[in-house]
Image (tube, grey):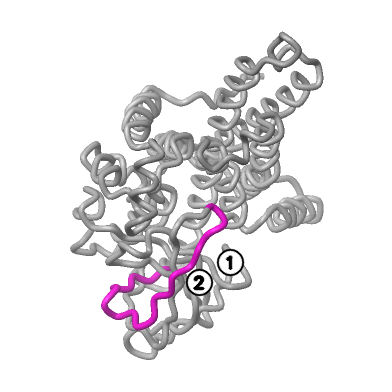
Amino acid sequence: MTALSFAPDEHAQAVAELASRICRDFSSPEAFDRADAGSGVQADALRALGRASLLGLCREPNQLASLCSAIELCTAAGDAMLRVPVAALSAIVAPALHTAEHPALADVLEGRTVACAALAEAYDALPTSPACRADESGTSLLSGEKVMIEAGHAAQLFVVSAADDKGASLFIVHRDDIADLQEQRATSLERVVGLQLRRTPATRVGATHGEAHRIHDLCVDRYRLLLSAHQLGVARRALAMTAEHVNARQQFGVSLASFQAVKQRFADAWIGCSQLDLAVREAAWRLDNGRSAGRAIAVATHTACVAGQAVTYAAQHLHGGTGVDRSYPLHRYFLRSRMNAVLLGGAARSLEAIANSLAEEAHYGSSDE
């Protein structure tokens, strides 16, 4: 039996080093405060990532080779708590604009123009069949509501998921065509927006309905995986901060790290991080190698929702009162892990997908998963 290796290749390692260096340059509390006071987006960080050619790693829907590199980018962004929605940009926005041959593609990939994804709806953060409807009896007109849109305040373009009688597709909408943009506040305390679409003109991504539905499903799967990678970065940094805290903090003349209960709590959190890392990399490997990956992506998503939140909760616990002090950065990681879980649709959704996959395999026979 040949052992599988999910370790990043040389290109992905180079992307990881470059992305980590750029992201850490923009991770100060002062930088976050400036973003919160403005549009909610770190425009300087966005441009830096664009200059480094890191925003278009997955721009071609049929090209999978750069997926592992995009995972490293999203992990680095989560680690630094960067106020740039790199998962949505990499998995949804770049492929949509590339497929549509949109004239703003170059500006978006270079970070000069902000574009964002609008997937979440009031009762479903990641719908497979969006309630937002597309009327394509001529030009595409969208009607419905979208919520929790990251970078929406600064965006000039929105990539919106909507459905018609034939299935779900992605549509490109210009900000000037949106009449109602609403201020919202996310779980993570970051600025997000909601929008109301009332027969809003849009451009469908895909030359035919079949191609449009295929691109939608592929991009949403990649988004789930890259957002899970972002959750991995969030959890890793929270764990690293906790390790530093319990080693430095003294109680009864010894460090907190010397107590057995602390060691056990930390070990459980470390195992959770390792589970998430393995789940994300296995799903990426399956996609890169043309394997069926639906169940693997669901496992990665479920692990991100459950283990990712458990790690940041443990970090809060082991920090004690320091963990809830808003002048200390840990609270940002705790809240962002909650927001990521919401954007992924929650643990129950992915668990249902895993169960359906297993039931289908039992009924119809073996699969390659």
Which image quarter is the C terminus in? top right
**What range of the chain is rendered magenta?**
168-188
Q: Which residue is drawn at 63% across and 15% down?
A: 247
Drawn side of residue 74 relative to residue 178, left or right: right
Dominant secondary structure, magenta: strand
Farthest front residue in view: 252
Position in image of residue 176 (x %, y %): 26, 77
Look at the picture and state if 67 lies above or below 100: above
Position in image of residue 126 (x %, y %): 57, 63
Question: Does the stretch in magenta take in 186?
Answer: yes
Position in image of residue 129 (x %, y %): 58, 72
Q: Mark 2 = which residue? A: 168
Look at the picture and state if 227 lies above or below 238: below
Question: Does the stretch in magenta take in 123?
Answer: no
Drawn side of residue 316 relative to residue 263, left or right: left
Q: Do the residues labelled 1 and 2 touch (CB within 8 Å)?
A: yes
Q: Mark 1 = which residue? A: 128
Disc 1 marks which amino acid?
Thr
